[in-house]
Image: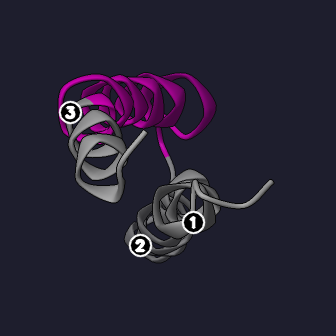
């Protein structure tokens, strides 16, 4: 599989599946876990959630750029 194909697959999966699912999950989690929290707790929650979305993308990057000609 070429690098372009891997990048296309990863981009489609990330943009159309991972990010919307993660956003809905975090919004639902916030409404269940922090319904009456102060603005500072909400800010901390969203700062952490806004940082954690990148972890699976960071794991996909080595796969996308791995040379497929290795044997």
Residue count near mark 2 (Cα–Cα under 10 Å), binned few <14, some 14–19, many ≥20: few
Whether residue 39 sits left or right of residue 67 in the image: it is left
Residue 17 in percent (x, y) is at 30, 23
Circle 2 residue? 43
Tags 3 and 2 touching, CB below 8 Å: no
**Coordinates of residue 39 in the picture (x, y in percent):** 38, 69
Disc 3 versus disc 2: nearer the observer: 3
Which residue does the image show at 20% across and 39% down from the upper left?
A: 15
**Of pointers 1 and 3, the one earlier in the residue sequence:** 3
Numbered disc 3: secondary structure:
helix
- Residue 14 occupies quadrant: top left
Q: Which residue is mark 3?
A: 12
Write down the region rendered in magenta.
Answer: 13-36
Let me know if residue 65 is in the magenta part: no
Task: List the residue tagged with mark 1.
Answer: 67
Mark 1 Cα shell of 10 Å, populated few (<14), some (14-19), many (≥20): few
């Amino acid at each position: 599989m070429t690098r372009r194909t891997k990048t296309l697959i990863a981009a489609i999966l990330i943009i159309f599946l991972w990010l919307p699912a993660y956003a809905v999950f975090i919004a639902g989690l916030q409404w269940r876990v922090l319904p009456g929290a102060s603005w500072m707790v909400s800010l901390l929650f969203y700062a952490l959630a806004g940082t954690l979305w990148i972890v699976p993308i960071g794991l996909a990057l080595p796969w996308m750029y791995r040379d497929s000609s290795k044997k």
